[in-house]
Amino acid sequence: MFARLCSAALFVSFLMGASAHAQTQLTAQLRLQQGPIGSMFKVPDPRGEFVRLCAPHMIGRWAHPETVCSCLHDYAAATVEDNDLREALLRGISETGVPTIETDWVPRSKQSEIGPTFTKIAKPTLQCMFEPSTN
């Protein structure tokens, strides 16, 4: 009887110990995901990254470079439906500070659409550059 009682107590303490160990590991994993190491793996905001790359090209040209870059991003993202053309346009703006699309940035089948894309974004681009809202 005494042996059964001791073995039952030992078994219960083993289960409780394993449960506490598992909970400790889960807590450590959650802390790791939420801590500084976990935050390193977060994907940056594409709009914020675009503005970060674009703004240095606008300094000296415009009073509010971040506002101009944000505006250009928003209009390009909203106006250009084709993903390849939109990505090429955003790349050109972020690398040069002006709407640019290099022909080798888009598939050969879409290169004829570069001109119409610039026509589509001409007015919004001018508005961004000369009438930006300064929130």
Image: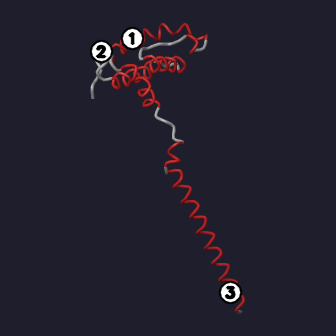
Q: Quick one: SS at disc 2?
A: helix
Q: What secondary structure is found at the residue carrying circle 1?
A: helix
Disc 3 from disc 2: Cα separation = 84 Å
Taking depth in this image into account, of 40 and 99 the one nearest to the observer is 40
Which residue appears at 43% of the width and 8% of the height?
A: 119
Identify the mark nearer the N-term, 1 or 3.
3
Q: Residue 21: where, in percent of width, then height?
A: 60, 67
Q: Amino acid at mark 3?
A: Cys
Q: Residues within 10 Å of mark 1 (few under 14, many from 20)?
A: few
Residue 8 x %, y %: 67, 83
Q: Do labels 1 and 3 touch, CB within 8 Å?
A: no
Q: Position of residue 124 (x, y in %)?
A: 36, 15
Residue at the extreme bottom of the image, as rendered: 1
- Between 39 and 81, the residue placed more toward the observer is 39
Disc 2 versus disc 1: nearer the observer? 2
Residue placed at 47% from the left, 13% from the top? 100
Q: Which residue is mark 3?
A: 6
Circle 2: residue type: Phe
**Discs 3, 2 touching: Cβ within 8 Å:** no
Residue, disc 1 = 122
